[in-house]
Image (spheres, rainbow, N blue to C red):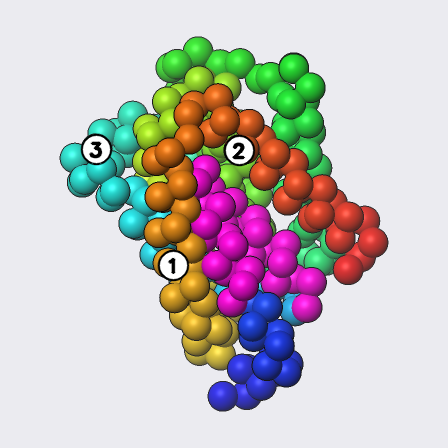
Amino acid sequence: MEIFAALGPPHLWFLAYAIALAAGVVKGVVGFAMPLILLSGLSSFMAPDLALACLIVPTLLTNAWQALRQGPMAALASLKRFRVFLIAGGSMLILSAQLVPVLPASALLLIIAVPLVAYAAATLAGRPLRLPPHPGPRIEAGMGGAAGFIGGLSGVWGPITVAMLTAMETEKREQVRIQGVMYGLGALALAGAHLGSGVLNAQTLPLSVALVPPALLGIWTGFAIQDRIDQALFKRLTLWILLIAGLNLLRRGIMGL
């Protein structure tokens, strides 16, 4: 197919598979960052809107696995607990996705990078955002709406979600499962929204499907690692991954690359 040839020589396919594998490993360990890593890595040699299309199917399938890892009843409990966040986020995601075809690529990268770097750097510096275990519907709706707005533009809605869960001192396994539920539903909304925006179409869908095998292998490996680390290390890994990915996106947004 022409879209596969347009990606470039074989070594770029090898690079794309390596990025998807790495993204899967990181997601398995900390529960998020697959879209961040895929968008950051793939957009270094393809257009950001094509990179966004590529991440949709791997993100959808890995989140389904992550959400259901402790069984459907646990996933359902997470869904009920964070329903306000999810409704607000899904609504804003669908609306903001329509802006992707007209938004400059540099703006797309900066919109996600700036709040991401600010949150991770502040928390690592000892100034964390703190929320009660049940912050209330207004705060959840506000954070859900912000996460959905960014997610529709970039395919990356994790930073605000992770910020909220980390600020609530959520236990490691529960945090990973909740992220799987949230991101899985978000991925469904993202796929539908970008079928409407034209980013995901008959030409770009096969590219996205092609990245599924390395992504699944990666998350399987990451789950094995996650089971062996403690809560403190889990939290610090989460913050460092947020910071590194955010700085790379910030660099690319400023340089216009």
Which residue position is annotated with label 2? Answer: 238
Q: Mark 2 or mark 1: which is in front? A: 1
> Residue 199: horizontal and vertical position, in percent?
53, 66
* Furthest residue in direction right, as rendered: 255
Q: Amino acid at mark 1?
A: Leu
SS class, disc 3: helix
Q: Which residues are magenta?
A: 17-45
Which residue position is annotated with label 1? Answer: 217
Q: Which numbered tag is attached to residue 112?
A: none
- Would you say 194 lies left or right of 241 here? left
The residue sitting at 49% across, 14% down in the picture is 131
In reply to whether residue 25 is colored magenta, the answer given is: yes
| Position of 54 relative to 224 (above/below) | below
> Residue 91: horizontal and vertical position, in percent?
43, 42
Q: Assign the C terminus to one quadrant of the image.
A: bottom right
Residue nearest the observer in this picture, 93 or 51: 51
